[in-house]
Amino acid sequence: MDAINDLSLDDEAFSIDVDQDPILCRDEKLDTPDKEVRVHCGMLRSARYVLEILRANRILEGLKMKYPDFTIVCCGHSLGAGVATLLTLLLKQSFSPIQCFAFSPPGCVISENGLEETQKFVFSVYIGDDIVPRLSYQTVCKLKYDVIMSLACSNSPKYKILLRGLYRLCFSHPWQPDQVL
């Protein structure tokens, strides 16, 4: 998203696209009682693209024949970690053993009822105060609500708040939580 969309507070700018075809509904090995596992649509599209290329070139089948005991390892960072997580879930239906190393994956990759399944195959690493792993649909909605409520309660013209915030972002010391616009 560009800065204009981010600042618009439009529902479309903040929507988290969720796949309408549950990724694991046909997975017989799934250990969740509710097989309705929802995932981020864009990341799933990317994972399916990678899977399509692997299948079209018969890469995994060739490796499995040459190295029958090998473990498939998927890894990624940030949004790539989300894609690697979903690719692992797609591949585990046909290939085993499989493992994923996800460095700072976003919090909006998979619905809560699918988290238990990822714990068996995905090892996630979170580094410091990285914001990406803390982003989820719920946190973005809460942030949007908090910003709208703060703006509604403010008597200052909204353009002044925006310009002051942009100025401080670009030219002043790091923002402190106790500062008020």
Image: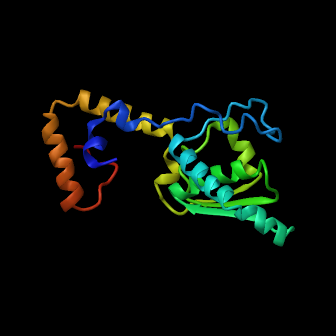
- Please tell me whether residue 139 is drawn above or below residue 56 in the rendered image: above
Residue 134: where, in percent of width, then height?
Answer: 51, 49
70 on left or right of 106: right
Residue 176: where, in percent of width, then height?
Answer: 32, 54
* Residue name at image x 69 percent, y 30 percent: 36
* Residue name at image x 65 percent, y 52 percent: 87
Judging depth in this view, the residue of 180 and 127 nearest the camera is 127
Judging depth in this view, the residue of 1 and 164 nearest the camera is 1
Extreme-bottom residue of the structure? 66
Extreme-right residue of the structure? 69
- Please tell me whether residue 146 is drawn above or below residue 50 in the rendered image: above
- Please tell me whether residue 145 is drawn above or below residue 139 in the rendered image: above
Numbered marks: total: 0
Residue 171: where, in percent of width, then height?
Answer: 18, 61
Judging depth in this view, the residue of 69 and 145 nearest the camera is 69
Q: Is residue 56 visible?
A: yes
73 on left or right of 52: right
Q: Is residue 107 visible?
A: no
Which quadrant: the C terminus?
top left
Residue 115: where, in percent of width, then height?
Answer: 68, 43
* Residue name at image x 14 percent, y 38 percent: 159
4 on left or right of 160: right
